[in-house]
Amino acid sequence: MVDPIASYSQFKKRSDSPKIYQDARDILNHVGFFEGTEKLLEVWLESEPDDPLVENIEENIHVDNEAVTSKSADRSIWPSLRLISEEEWNHILKHYAKCTVLSVISNDKIDAYILSESSLIVFDNKFILKTCGTTTPLAALQPILTFARERCKLSVVKDVFYSRRGYTDPFAQVSPHRSFDEEVKYLSGLFGSASAYILGRLNGDPWYLYTVDNYVKNQQADQTLEILMTSLPSEIMSHFILAVHGTAEEMCEAVGIKSLFPTFIFDLKAFDPCGFSLNGIKGQFYVNCHVTPQTECSYLSLETNWPEKDYTEIVKKLVTTFNPGNVLLTLFVNQSSICPNSILGVKEDDILGYKRVDKQYCEFSNSYNVTLLTITKPSFKL
Ligand SMILES: C[S@@+](CC[C@H](N)C(=O)[O-])C[C@H]1O[C@@H](n2cnc3c(N)ncnc32)[C@H](O)[C@@H]1O
């Protein structure tokens, strides 16, 4: 790995502009607090069986020309959430979730948006909205469901997963995200009673999950690995300062994240003065990675639905690269996944230099199961 402090010195020699800070570490100490912790909302939708509008959807699409962007017009699978255009997503997110769309990449299965606060991944039949800071993604849910029903003819909510770890500063959050109780009440108002869980330690590193456990088995193989790291060393976080590397591409190159997903196409964003976001897609698979490098609140998340029988190697590589003090990892899988039992998906004993704090397993009636694993460096205090 390139030494970021050396890169910074070279940058300073090259640059004529006066610099307020002496070195990269000072920047990380002075930028100020940011809540990196994301709220992660995944919603699966389908059309009403025997909906005549769906049967005639192609006809409807030609009639309602304004509703169809050229990007989505050649799709073969209807109905689709991808009929919602970038401008429409931006409008909904700006007004309700309090974040904006910065860029998008697409292939024939996915539209992946980088947001001012994290990512939105849109498939034909589901969307994954991941936002950090003091955003309010749940407030965007109703408008999204209205668009899904009226524009995309997807009126049936098949599955909902809403999760997050504990906020670093819960008092900065705004309604409906001021507490997990408030989030659950809001979701239950939309979807009726469902299942809400707290995993991990209430007096340490809790992780919250709400899911509509509706007994409907998802036949499509599905798995999601999410790794949330905190207490990251400033030498490594310095790579995510714009003054150090100049571009998101160089930041990415310096830490080698892309090499974990070699055949994906990527969209990258470097924030000023620091911070980094990445979306990657390949067929129906995505990865996103977001970094808040400030020393007082360092945070890095990586999430992917890439299928593996065993995720230990990916986790080992990430932990070796970023050397965090604490890692909270969740693995969701369903019965059709090549890793059908999440508890076997990561072997923490192989992650040298780290000790297991907690490992918990939950099984749901929709055929999903989830494992939460927390590992720390022995010196780390929860
Ligand atoms: C990359 S974004 C995404 C955060 C993500 N949830 C994470 O994993 O931490 C957050 C980082 O970018 C920085 N940043 C700079 N300008 C920003 C902006 N306009 N909106 C959000 N973050 C910004 C923040 O200070 C923080 O370091």
Image (spheres, rainbow, N blue to C red):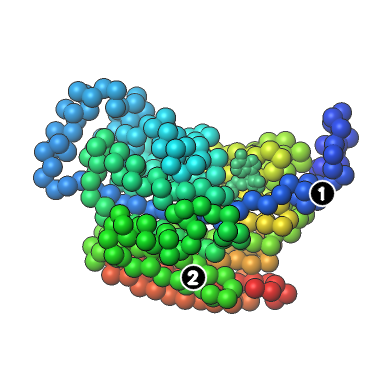
Report the front residue among 170 and 10.
Answer: 170
Sooner in the amino-acid sequence: mark 1 or mark 2: 1
Q: Which mark is residue 240?
A: none
Q: Which three-letter amino acid code belongs to the residue tagged 2?
A: Leu
**Would residue 338 appear left or right of 311 to someone viewing this image?**
left
- Classed neighbour count for the residue bearing mark 1: other residues with Cα under 10 Å, few (<14), some (14–19), many (≥20): some
- Is residue 144 visible in the rendered image? The answer is yes
In the rendered view, tell whether residue 18 sits above or below residue 160: above
Q: Residues within 10 Å of mark 2 (few under 14, many from 20)?
A: many
Residue at 32 percent across and 34 percent down: it is 83
State ligand 1's quadrant: top right
Q: Which residue is mark 1?
A: 26
Residue nearer the viewer, 94 or 46: 94
What residue is at 84 percent from the left and 30 percent from the top?
17
**Which of the two residues, 94 or 346, is positioned nearer the viewer here?**
94
User: Toward the viewer: 14 or 145?
Assistant: 145
Is residue 77 in view? no
Question: What percent of the width, then of the height, locates residue 254?
Answer: 70, 46
**Residues at badges 1 and 2 in contact (C-beta under 8 Å)?**
no
Considering the numbered disc 1 on the image, is that residue within a helix, a strand or a loop?
Answer: helix
Task: From the image, tell me which residue sits under label 2.
Answer: 372
Q: Is mark 2 within 8 Å of ligand 1?
A: no
Q: Residue at x 51, y 76 (%)?
A: 359
- As helix, strand or loop, the secondary structure at mark 2 comes to strand
